[in-house]
Image (cartoon, rainbow, N blue to C red):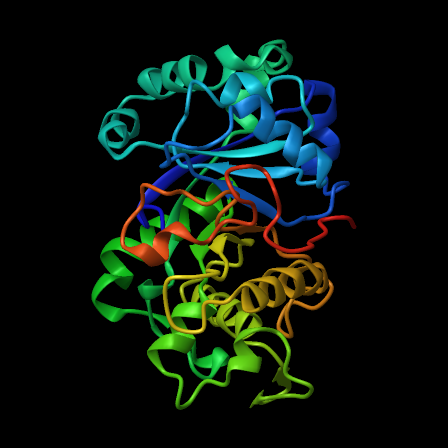
Amino acid sequence: MANDNEYSVQIEALPFSDYKKRYRGALNAQTGASYGTIGDDLPPATEVVALCHQYNIQRIRLFNPNPSVLPALNGTNISVIVGVPNEDIIGIARDAQLAQSWVWNNILSHAEYLQRGFCIWLGERVKVSTALSFGVLGTSYPPSAGAFRPEIQSSYIKPIVQFLVKTQGPFLVNVYPYFAYVSNPNDIRLDYALFTSPSTVVRDGQYQYQNLFDAMVDAAHAALQKVGGDVEVVVTETGWPSAGGTATTIDNARSYNSNLIKSVRNGTPRKPGKPIETYIFDLIDENQKSPELEKHWGLFLPNKQPKYPISFAK
């Protein structure tokens, strides 16, 4: 998994004329993938971008402004979330000019289509947020009881939420039903975690839940409401490993990710009809990660072959 305290700058690798359509909601939230690069057998970035086009993956999350990846995205219609490395965060948080320079040097210098609208775009279109672990919630069951951990709520969470409300930025959170299941298999059914339950599993007042992902996202919604944050929730990481641990099979990974893509188009019981922008971890297996479980989250093998049939088509 990626660093859970990562600040992210969201950019769109589109001609500037298309931004108004994007931010007016003309493009529905669609499932994308996190693109990690901790491996010594990964294909070149240009081939990865071609792979994304082949499978209609229109959103990518990068954990850092990788100079070998960003140029490959130039001129495409792929939207990108780019992470700011931890060592850069303090500097750009304190100095607006340094922040502007960082965006120019690490983002816009790679994207010729964005440079034409730089002045307007940088002031109005860059959305800054921080990707958080689901562990920032102290309570998540039932979903309506969702609440942030009290020891971090005032000092850490509330300032972030107030900033997001002010800037209309999204709340980024990593949601992993896999880890919830393996930590408590006696109380959490596998079919509930895999989106395969044939009927409602959890009833929470007027809301009924047939899968754990929706319940976890709605717990985040409830927690945000309690601190005055009616902002969009974006799931920056989710997925299911195909090997290396408990319940890690190709079939389980296929079932989770395929059903996830379909499910997020419909929103959650608390937010029905509102698609959830979601990023599957990981695009391609990364063989230099550890422990062993971390190597097997990819949708694709390093040879660009899919592990199982999967469709991102709307």
Residue 262 visible, this orientation: yes
In percent of the image, x 44 and y 69: which residue is there? 178
- Does residue 275 appear left or right of residue 109 in this picture? right
Query: Is 307 rendered above or below residue 144?
Result: above
Quarter assignment of residue 310: bottom right
In percent of the image, x 71 and y 59: which residue is there? 265
In percent of the image, x 79 and y 50: which residue is there? 314
In percent of the image, x 62 and y 63: which residue is there? 260
- Does residue 298 appear left or right of residue 54 in this picture? left
Residue 12 visible, this orientation: no
Number of numbered callouts drawn: 0
Quarter assignment of residue 21: top right
Most foreground residue, 126 or 66? 66
> Residue 248 placed where, x, y %?
45, 67
> Residue 46 placed where, x, y %?
58, 22
Most foreground residue, 60 or 231? 60
> Residue 221 placed where, x, y %?
51, 66
- Does residue 90 appear left or right of residue 22 in this picture? left
- Does residue 51 appear left or right of residue 137 in this picture? right
> Residue 243 placed where, x, y %?
43, 61
